[in-house]
Amino acid sequence: MSLDADLIVDRRRMRRKLTFWRVIAIALIVLAIAGAATLTTNRIGLIGGRPYIARVTISGLIRGDQDRVRRLARLARSSRVRAVILHVDSPGGTTAGSEQLFDALSRVRERKPLVVVVDSLAASGGYITALAGDHIVAQQTSLVGSIGVLFQYPNVADLLDKIGVKVESIKSTPLKAAPDGFEPTSPEARAAIQSIIMDSYTWFKGIVQSRRHLTDDQLAAVDDGRVFTGHQGIDLKLVDEIGDERTAIAWLAKAKKVDATLPVRDYELQSRFSDLPFLHAAAVAVLDAAGLSTLARQLDDLGAVATAQEFNLDGLLALWHPAAAN
């Protein structure tokens, strides 16, 4: 009986040691992956003092991002960066996030030649981003424009009325927290929202007119919220040239006297350690393989929450999306 008890104790001790070394191994693997990602991110810094053209990419939904602002400021200060090629592929996002990004890129433009290449889409807040460039290049079939501002909110008042649920609130004034989605929107609340929409819309149009040097009539032809192809954008002065990155490099060489033989290197705006999906997936897989399934599930759930938060857009939107088919 005593022998069995000793055997159980030894097994438990061995299991604890095994778990300890598993955790150490996992930490080393994660650190190795993070180190490799960091080396990839900072590969430009390993080239000594060699000058280059930085390639910056803005894609997906645009939100406020202070880390991105800091990295763009670092880019602007870099003595090795001779110019910046900004690739844009975005339907926009929040107006505040788009304004923040436009301002940060404008500060880069003050110190470096900045040319924009529209890949597939530069609409709404994505077009605000493109306006930061000295020159806009797009493909024939790229989409640009969607000059306008949007405010959306769900209203479930009719649904709550049908199921017999009433949400009551006590407000300091009728327009506090209006509209709230739990009651029909009053004319006063709708007028208040319309006022801030039009104020932001005026700001958006002002940037377009100033950066693209449009007359009032030229602005009126493009400010109704539509998107246009890159080909249409040439005549409408939303785009300067049809082409791709090679076209952008040629423009830098001709207009800004930038050496066209300089290497073009990616400049990351986000930390690979915190943002790359492969790192998160690798950590989950390693934890699962090490027998720590509970911890792996918790990490996976944390990633799902972060992803959901990433696509949660609050406030005024400078966002384009095609209407769903009926």
Image (tube, helix red, strand yellow):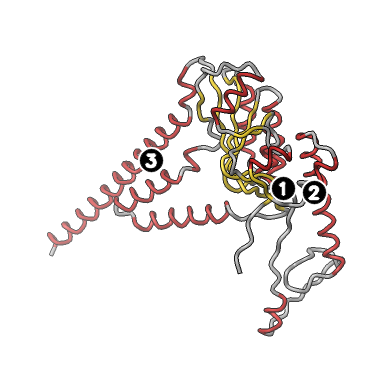
Left or right position of 314 against 58: right
The residue under the point 61% across, 23% down is 83
In the picture shown, does residue 317 fall above or below 36?
A: below
In the picture shown, does residue 4 fall above or below 259?
A: below
* Label of residue 95 in the image: 1
The residue under the point 76% across, 74% down is 183
C-alpha distance separating marks 2 and 3:
44 Å
**At which x and y percent is residue 103?**
72, 35
**At which x and y percent is residue 12?**
24, 55
C-alpha distance separating marks 2 and 1:
8 Å
Query: Which amino acid, mark 1?
Result: Thr
Left or right position of 275 against 170: left
The answer to whether the residue labelled 2 contacts the one labelled 1, judged by CB atoms less than 8 Å apart, is yes
Query: Which amino acid, mark 2?
Result: Ser
Quick one: SS at disc 3?
helix
Residue behind mark 3: 30
Residue behind mark 2: 200
In the picture shown, does residue 79 fall above or below 173?
A: above
Front residue (pair 152, 208) = 208
The residue under the point 76% across, 46% down is 222
Indicate the quadrant where residue 236 lies.
top right
